[in-house]
Structures are given as structure tokens and as C-alpha cells.
Image (cartoon, grey):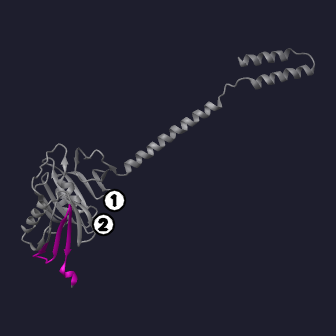
Amino acid sequence: MANNHFDDQWELLKQIGSTDMQKDVIRRRIRQSIAHAPSKAHPFKFLQWKSIVAASLLVVIFGGFLFMLLEKNPRLNNAGYFTVDDQSFSWRLENVTSKKSGEKLELYYKNNPIPFGTVKEVTEAEKNATIASKSMFVNKELEHFPYKTNMYIEHVKMQDVVIRYYFFIPLTAEKWIQFTFDYPKLEYANIFKAMSTLELNGKKSYHHNEPLYVTYGYERMIYPVDLEPVSVTSNNNEVYRWEDASTKAYHQYVEKILQDVSWQKKSGKGLSTTFVSVIFQNEVTITLNGNELTYEYFYPEQDE
């Protein structure tokens, strides 16, 4: 309609043959009509669409960045289980995150950005090759653990790793699941809490009804398997929270230590007992206070 209006005005202008003053009047009317005519363009709506498009692009970019960040960083397994290849598993060790790295799963503890261990599936040949290529100083089968477990300890002696644990559990006749843990990135107690509470999806686990004990590293002293580190500040003093602590459990523990002929009881009172090593002559006092189990080591050669 606006175009027809302008055409009519133009025809009127062409028909005028009067004075210049009349022509100027007509021209002013035409300019006024053009100035007040509704515009077909809608700049405000155009700006609205630009804002919507820009906001959408920001959402896409931010979403992609967030996805990359989550893929790069370890993820907390809120579901309570981990998956490597076709095998999923869980344990009662808390504050563990994981990240897929090639064919293995890297494990992280709390907020430490450096992995403390790995999990992967290996063949019988790969397992044997790993054992043969490492400086393994300990080789034993763990008794009464949830699954048949072969444990090896590699003497690493790196700046941040002293020893590395290898645990092999058979999945089939030719396939194993391999766990590695680096000490001291992860404390001994946490390593054994993970393995003693392990549950493999689809494989029935064994639960021992009696107290379970393990040795730490190359030491001969046994520790209850259900300890949680509280303060392990030096080789001379260690404090743990004992999950199944009781007077009965403590005395059973003392009796279990004395079954090893390399330890002798030097003294004892209440829930505190001092043992002396027949081999190395070092002493250790083990005290239970509530649910806290304290180890105080004394090495005579340190005074020489």
C-alpha cells in the first residue's frame, strides 16, 4: 500500500503545470508522506535475533569447554563403582577418582592431581611379562581376601615412589585384572582397605569371618586390614582409626603377633603392649585408645 501511495503522489506531481510555488508545496507533501510512512525493516527485532544467536553460541562454546574439562580431569565415581574394559568393580576406599588413559584406568586420591595407581585387564602372557621385567622383591598369594589374589612388590626407589604394589586377580583362564598402587602416594592401610573390600561385578566374593591381618611393605609386623590412617608422620609414630576396635579384638591381635616367633612380648598393661624383634632388636609399643590404634617404634641403633 505504501508503494501505491507514492505512485499516486508522483502522478500528481507530473500533472502539475502551475507555478513553482505549487510544485514546492506538492514536493513537501510527498517528503512528509515518505517520512511518516511505516518502515518494512524492523531493526529492533533484528537486534533481538542477534542477541539470541549470540547467547546460543555462548552456550554451545561453554558446554564444549565444560565437556573437555570433565574429560581431562579425574571424575568422582558417585555411583560407587569403576569400570575398566568390560569389568566393573567397587571397594570401600573413599575419595577415589578415576580417568581413562589408553587401555588403563588411572586412580587419584582426594585432590591430588597425580595418580596413585592404575587398573587394567591383562592376558596371562602380559602378566608374566610384567613380573619378569620388574624388580619384584615380594611374591605371595593373599589368604582370605575376597578373591584369589597374587601380590607382588616392586622396588622402585623413585623420588615420589618407594615401592609399587601389583595385585593380579584371575577373571578367566587367560585374562586377569591388574591393580597397581604406589607407596607413599597412597598409604599402606588404604591400599589394603581397597583390596580387602574389593567387589568385582559378576564375580562372587569371599568374606572371611575372622580378623584379617597384613604386613606393610617389607616389614614383619602385622596390621589389622581395616585400618584408616589418621597420622603417619614418621617411621617412629603411626596412628590409625580401627574400624572393628574392641578389647577382644585388641587381645586377639596381640596373640596373633606372638604367633610369629620373630616377635617377643617385652611388657604389657591394659590395652598397651610392647614387643621386641628377635631379629632386629627394634621395639614397638601398640596402644588402643578408643578406636585409635597407635604404633610407637624404637630403634636402638639410632642412639649409637
Outermost front residue: 270
Q: Position of residue 273 (x, y in %)?
A: 13, 70
Report the amino acid beneath label 2: Asp
Q: From the image, tell me which residue sits under label 1.
A: 114
Disc 1 and disc 2 in contact, CB within 8 angstroms: yes
Give the secondary structure at mark 1. loop
Q: Position of residue 26 (x, y in %)?
A: 85, 20
Q: Position of residue 96 (x, y in %)?
A: 29, 53
Q: Where on the picture, by quarter, is residue 38?
A: top right
Q: Is residue 283 above or below residue 239?
A: below
Q: Is residue 298 above or below residue 136?
A: below
Q: From the image, tell me which residue sits under label 2.
A: 160
Give the secondary structure at mark 2. loop
- Label 1 neighbourhood size at 10 Å, few (<14), some (14-19), many (20+)? few
- Is residue 292 one of those drawn in magenta? yes
Residue 74 appears in the picture as rendered:
yes
